[in-house]
Amino acid sequence: GEIVFIAVGTPPDEDGSADLRYVLEVARTIGRHLARPAIVVDKSTVPVGTADKVRATIAAELAARGESI
C-alpha cells in the first residue's frame, strides 16, 4: 500500500509509560516487507518521539535487506 497504518495497543509498562513493543514489532515487519516507498502512520497512542523510533526501526530492517529509505 501507499499508506501503512500502525494501529496496535500500547498498554502501560510497569512504570506507567507506554509499552511500545507491539508498535516496534509492526515497524520491524514493515521494514522486512516494504517493497516501495510508503507513508507510515502511527495510529496508536504513543509518546512524542515514537515516530523517530519507528522510522529508525524500519530503516534498520531495510538496511539488513540492503535497501534504504
Image (cartoon, rainbow, N blue to C red):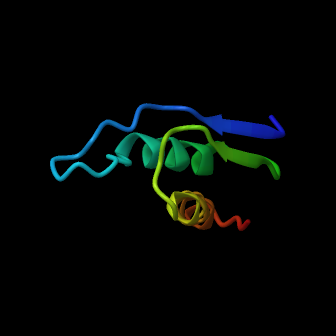
Residue nearest the observer in this picture, 13 or 31: 13
Residue sitting at 51 percent across and 58 percent down?
50
Instruction: Name the spot of residue 61 as percent of width and height, x first.
Output: 55, 59
Q: Which residue lies at the image location 31% right of the left edge and 36% below the top edge?
A: 11
From the top left corner, tell me how far across and down residue 16 is, in percent. Answer: 23, 48
- Residue nearest the observer in this picture, 22 or 10: 10
Judged left or right of residue 24, residue 34 is: right
| Quadrant of the rendered image containing residue 43 | top right
> Number of numbered discs present?
0
Q: Is residue 4 above or below residue 46?
A: above
Q: In the image, what residue occupies the spot 71% across and 68% down?
A: 68
Residue 29 in picture, x, y percent from top left: 54, 42
Does 18 appear above or below 44?
A: below
Q: With respect to residue 6, does 58 lie above or below?
A: below
Q: Is residue 7 visible?
A: yes
Horizontal relation, residue 23 to residue 69: left or right: left
